[in-house]
Amino acid sequence: MGEPSAPGTPRGDRLHHPQLTTLVDTARFHAAHSPQVTAVVCEDRALTYARLHRESNRVAHAIRATGAAPGARVAYLGKESEHYYEILFGCAKSETVLVPINWRLTAPEVSHILQDSGSDLLFLEDEFGPVLDRLPTAPPKTVVRLAEGTGPAAWTAGHPDTDPALSPTPDTPVAQLYTSGTTGLPKGVVLAHRSFFAVRDALAGAGLDWIDWRAGDIALVGIPGFHVGGLWWATQNFNAGVTVASMRAFAPREAIDLIRDKGVTTACVVPAMLRMMLGEPGVEPDDFTTLRKIVYGGSPISEALLEESLALFGSEFAQIYGLTETGNTAVCLPPADHIPGHPRMKAAGHPYPGIGSKVIDGEGKELPTGAVGEICLATPAHMVEYWALPGKTAETLVDGWIHTGDAGYVDDDGYVFIQDRIKDAILVAGENVYPAEIENALERHPGVAEAVIVGAPDERWGEKVHAFVVPVAGREPSPRDLHRFLVDRLAAFKLPAAYEFIAHVPRNPSGKILRRALRDRFWNDADRKVN
């Protein structure tokens, strides 16, 4: 279907600096042209663009002093703060690749990422020191401990704050984010600088205000920085030269206070975060008078939640859809389409200008408008590769098209509708969870003969993990036993919400598990098999 025409309203008052094509350009430009503008505010601390430039220069020099060559992986295990962004820009300026690690992961999960990425340098917040102590493998060669609120200043002391003067290209890798794997082990998605500029340029080139950045904006980053949505949103605001309001971790009361007290104008969240803020005692529309736009993604928004959110927040809403592999958003449901009850509220959105969409069948043949198949997206922001997995890369990135693993269709106006999932992913509060990872962990329990994991609808989190377990005869574990077994092996968001014991796993004549036969029972009354 290629590139459809793009609906929307042209605007001419947005911030756009087309000459910036890498994050290094971004740091240099704003330090020179708006040095005293606040780049990041976190808790009671603020960092100007001039200081962000200087401190990230020190980080870059210190990284290079360890012997890290261009392309070396640098891991970060900690929560968000201004110091996280000093490290991000320091990696960009040293031409190394930042590997942000989900701080909710267990020690074995963290170990896999460190070993797979080959990170010889790890920035570690003190809060997560116990994780390092429990690693089943050797830690990276260099571990930089960060006390909360202080950042890497002690480690970079003595290094110059001058620009390292390296000039990466838009195709130079800058980040490697890990996603849950279909085979049980997370894969490293390598993103280049261009992933953080392509959509901005597409919107500006078409004069569209689906998502925009304006002078004086203060942008709340509600999605964690180890997630592509959080990293992408923060960089968009840095590229525009506005202020990022960083939260250590999302908490609804803190988010409300931050929006009100700091005059936040834009925010990027998942729908579950909206629901949490709506549920806070004493929250009222006056808390959000400065908020003009909420960008959300990770899961669709229900009609009821949209109506409540429109009444409380009083802002525009823009839904984004994409994958880590597409460099985050590739499709957007613009504010003009956020009309309760309108059929387009069931759409993921419309591709940005210059981004193509098509639907294919199981043989790779393109299907006509309205036919359901696998959604594929062609975007200049797409990943470089899955780190050290050329076969998996070739399966997902084919001739410039990302095969999403989502089943859906495209309508006559170019809107993309998601109907189901092909790759069995479960979406828990915006986090992709793959059954194989949980099944592999469960089947290590001596009382489990076999396990099958499916996703079930959940009103708060979108979806939840449901475990079907075939117990070993005479050694049947209890749900409590299984929970205790998994809690040190899997991150909390991957843990099953319920365990159901069955006599055998349904299979077809060739022995393949009929996962859908188990999953569909939860979704039979739904008009689409995603939530």
Image (cartoon, rainbow, N blue to C red):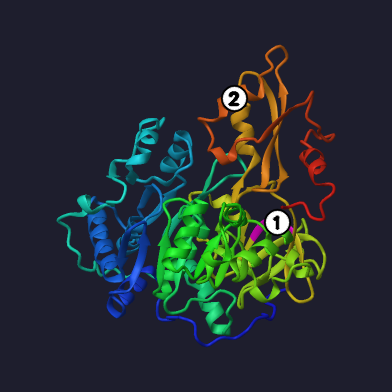
For marks 1 and 2, the one nearer the N-term is 1
Magenta stretch in the rendered image? 403-407
Where 134 sits versus 71, above or below?
above
User: Label 2, on which residue?
Assistant: 444
479 sits to left or right of 287: right
Q: Quadrant of residue 269?
A: bottom right
Q: Quadrant of residue 174?
A: bottom left
Chief secondary structure of the magenta portion: strand
Question: Given the image, on which type of amino acid does mark 1 rest?
Answer: Asp
Q: Secondary structure at mark 2?
A: loop
Magenta run includes residue 405? yes
The picture places residue 491, in percent across and down from the top left corner, at 53, 38
Q: Quadrant of residue 484?
A: top right
Q: Residues within 10 Å of mark 2 (few under 14, many from 20)?
A: few
Task: State the separation of the CA atoms marked 1 and 2.
Answer: 30 Å
Where 99 sits versus 373, above or below?
above
Which quarter of the rendered picture does the N terminus lie within?
bottom right
The picture places residue 118, in percent across and down from the top left corner, at 39, 45
Magenta run includes residue 471? no
Check the image and name the residue furthest to the top.
474
The picture places residue 142, in percent across and down from the top left corner, at 28, 43
- Residue at the spot 52% in from the left edge and 76% down from the top edge: 212
User: Label 1, on which residue?
Assistant: 406
Check the image and name the residue furthest to the bottom.
12
185 sits to left or right of 8: left
Query: Does residue 171 appear in the picture of this structure?
Result: no
301 sits to left or right of 62: right
